[in-house]
């Protein structure tokens, strides 16, 4: 037994021992402690603001008393469409950002004037949430992902560093232990984290097979050479190998860090949340708990050695991976400070651990859950969730939680709800019957991550609170283009090609919108949330494209039968929406939450977001889906965009959730804001790109706000 199997009722000593599993390499020593590198309070030098990932700034010029005076200080329009999720960096008066197609740029952070721009020549089609910065002496570098490449750019000029990797970049498809490397699908959508002379990265992997393993890797920031690699799907002889079938390390994939990481720079510990293993929803080829999928890992940042781990979901069948970097903070227990780490989940929970030992600082409750009825599948018998704090999203959809927006919508919801299975968390999907996932596949919490005020130990997290459904269907074992679509594409776009817009667009009549070459290109290279499929042959990609364009399933020549491990596929990510397109559950559909992690008690909780047309009809405080996190300041403010439909950027009183200021952006601000100071003037900047509202166009604009300049007195 190790810490991912502990029980809430264990004694304190036993609990402590359970949090100290063997390290995954011969070195047994904890990382040495070193002084933390200096950080200017004027800057926003890392993704999430700090190495600890707390989204916090000590700046106070903009505060509760004057935030209503905020006005636009400057804007920078990238001139591109496609949306933005980027949390920019600001160092020494320069802002570093990304365009929707993954071109890098530097701006004068006080004026928004362009200083340089870098175009790799590759059109980025994936989300890109941020960059990393490294400096030593007079040398400074920007490290950033463009599709499957990691670039090192001169921070002063934007030019690639010629002696880093291959002429300024490394190919992340290489050194994964799967050949050919060109068939691996991996994208650096969340930035790596810098520690000393290392850049530590994860990557986004496919959620269908074949997929490469989600190894956590550290590269030399000067040369690009691989320094260490942690296998999230353990190799023979490594800790956790017994939690998979014996040959799974050769064929299973993912268990990857797509969400980003956090760092204890003093102790040299990097904290890594991992995703689910592929295939997400049917795991007959990966029977067992599947370490280190769905884990929070604590690794020695210098060596990659495992120090401790906690597995949030054993043998995940629901895509319930940890969606954002954890947050490091200090909490009080019995009058004593404890250095802690908080991890939010898609299900709406906050896990809190001692960051050194991995001991849970709130009780964990372990319960038994139903077995799977799908042939070949063996669901985990038990799962553990924290008893405190109470979840920030609803957990069990019942008839009394269905929409009352109109009588017609309510009747529709009641009629359809009767067809579903709704028994709460960890219910395995079945064949032919839709099972409710509540909160939905996209949270609860999502990739924007929470903010923490280190002075109060209050965590602020925005949450989605709508229902989705899922079911499995037989894929068949015939070699047809339809079966190939089922195994590779239906997980997002559904059996009937209807998708779940806007995240998963409908493919019905796709040939009327895209020509054949464009369909092929999108399958091969990906777009938006869709990863590319370099693992498929040209013949297989053409077969799927032909099926989508012509609607006819054809025999595949020479490609063999489908893998038996994918005998079942998800019929699609299905939002439970009423006929008018609104959530079929009662509001709030999105919330903003403040929780005191010293006690686990809620400081406040409010609905978050509006549908403009419903607000105009008098339906306020319904909340909406939201993506992008909050930022909190010592000025007593919480800044957040995130909401999908109202395009608003808001400032709240962080002590009580009172709305103090809001403005409408040109596009929804589905990104985390940053705040910084230049020449004594504080700014708040957010990347606004939209893209999640089918009724609105997308773009790519950075908008900075500040207090009005005071005219010089004579």
Image: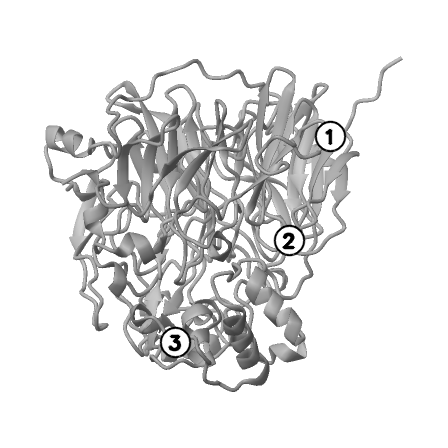
| Color theme of the render | one colour
Question: Residue at 19% of width from left, 63% of height from top?
Answer: 378
SS at badge 1: loop
Q: Nearer the viewer, mark 3 or mark 2?
A: 3
Quadrant for the C terminus, please: top right
Q: Which residue is mark 3?
A: 560
Spot occupied by residue 306 in the image (x, y as percentages of width and height): 29, 33
Q: Nearer the viewer, mark 3 or mark 1?
A: 3
Distance, label 3 to label 2, CA atoms, is: 39 Å
Label 3: how many Cα within 10 Å (few below 14, some 14–19, many 20+): few
SS at badge 2: loop
Q: Is residue 526 visible?
A: no
Q: Which residue is mark 1?
A: 157
- Give yes or no for contact between labels 3 and 2 (Cβ–Cβ under 8 Å): no
Quadrant for the N terminus, please: top left
Q: Which residue is mark 2?
A: 83
Q: Would you say 10 lies left or right of 520 here?
A: left
């Amino acid at each position: 037994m190790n810490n991912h199997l502990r029980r809430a009722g264990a004694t304190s000593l036993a609990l402590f021992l359970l949090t100290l599993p063997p390290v995954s390499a011969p070195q047994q020593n904890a990382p040495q402690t070193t002084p933390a590198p200096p950080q200017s309070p004027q800057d926003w030098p890392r993704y999430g603001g700090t190495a600890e990932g707390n989204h916090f700034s000590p700046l106070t010029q903009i505060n509760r008393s004057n935030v209503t005076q905020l006005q636009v200080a400057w804007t920078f329009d990238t001139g591109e469409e496609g949306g933005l999720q980027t949390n920019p960096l600001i160092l020494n008066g320069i802002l570093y950002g990304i365009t929707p197609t993954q071109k890098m740029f530097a701006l004068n952070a006080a004026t928004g004037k362009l200083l340089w721009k870098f175009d790799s020549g590759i059109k980025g089609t994936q989300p890109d949430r941020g960059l990393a910065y490294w400096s030593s002496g007079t040398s400074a570098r920007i490290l950033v992902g463009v599709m499957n490449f990691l670039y090192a750019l001169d921070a002063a000029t934007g030019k690639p560093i010629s002696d880093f990797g291959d002429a300024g970049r490394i190919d992340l498809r290489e050194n994964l232990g799967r050949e050919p490397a060109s068939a691996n699908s991996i994208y650096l959508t969340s930035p790596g984290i810098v520690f000393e002379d290392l850049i530590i990265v994860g990557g986004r992997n496919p959620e269908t097979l074949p997929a490469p393993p989600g190894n956590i890797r550290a590269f030399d920031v000067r040369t690009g050479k691989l320094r260490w690699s942690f296998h999230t799907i353990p190799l023979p002889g490594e800790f956790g190998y017994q939690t998979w079938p014996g040959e799974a390390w050769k064929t299973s994939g993912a268990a990857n860090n797509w969400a980003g990481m956090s760092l204890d720079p003093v102790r040299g510990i990097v904290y890594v949340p991992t995703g689910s293993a592929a295939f997400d929803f049917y795991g007959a080829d990966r029977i067992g708990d599947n370490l280190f999928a769905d884990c929070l890992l604590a690794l020695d940042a210098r060596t990659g050695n495992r120090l401790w781990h906690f597995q949030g979901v054993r043998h995940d069948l629901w895509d319930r991976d940890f969606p954002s970097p954890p947050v490091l903070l200090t909490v009080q227990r019995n009058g004593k400070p404890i250095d802690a780490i908080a991890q939010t989940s898609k299900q709406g929970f906050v896990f809190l651990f001692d960051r050194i030992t991995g001991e849970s600082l709130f009780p964990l409750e372990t319960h038994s859950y139903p077995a799977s009825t799908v042939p070949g599948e063996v669901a985990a018998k038990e799962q553990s969730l924290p008893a405190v704090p109470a979840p920030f999203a609803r957990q069990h959809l019942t008839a009394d939680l269905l929409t009352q927006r109109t009588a017609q919508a309510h009747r529709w919801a009641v009629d359809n709800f009767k067809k579903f299975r709704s028994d709460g968390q960890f219910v395995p999907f079945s064949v032919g019957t839709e099972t409710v996932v509540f909160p939905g596949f996209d949270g609860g919490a999502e990739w924007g991550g929470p903010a923490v005020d280190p002075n109060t130990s209050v965590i602020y997290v925005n949450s989605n609170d709508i229902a989705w459904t899922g079911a499995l269907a037989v894929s068949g074992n015939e070699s047809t283009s339809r079966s190939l679509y089922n195994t590779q594409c239906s997980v997002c776009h559904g059996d009937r090609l209807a998708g779940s817009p806007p995240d998963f667009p409908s493919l019905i009549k796709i040939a009327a919108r895209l020509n054949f070459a464009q369909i092929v290109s999108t399958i091969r290279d990906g777009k938006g949330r869709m990863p590319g499929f370099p693992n498929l042959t040209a013949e297989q990609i053409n077969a799927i494209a032909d099926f989508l364009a012509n609607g006819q399933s054809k025999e595949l020549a020479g490609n063999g039968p489908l893998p038996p491990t994918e005998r079942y596929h998800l019929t699609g990510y299905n939002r439970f929406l009423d006929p008018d397109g609104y959530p079929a559950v009662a509001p709030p559909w999105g919330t903003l939450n403040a929780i005191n992690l010293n006690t686990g008690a809620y400081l406040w909780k409010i609905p978050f977001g509006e549908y403009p047309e419903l607000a105009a009809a008098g339906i306020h405080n319904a909340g909406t889906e939201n993506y992008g996190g909050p930022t909190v300041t010592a000025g007593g403010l919480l800044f957040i965009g995130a909401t999908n439909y109202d395009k608003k950027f808001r400032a709240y009183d962080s002590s009580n959730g009172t709305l103090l200021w809001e403005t409408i952006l040109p596009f929804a601000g589905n990104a985390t804001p940053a705040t910084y100071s230049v020449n004594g003037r504080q700014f708040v900047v957010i990347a606004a790109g939209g893209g999640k509202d089918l009724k609105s166009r997308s773009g790519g604009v950075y908008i900075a706000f500040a207090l009005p300049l005071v005219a010089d007195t004579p």
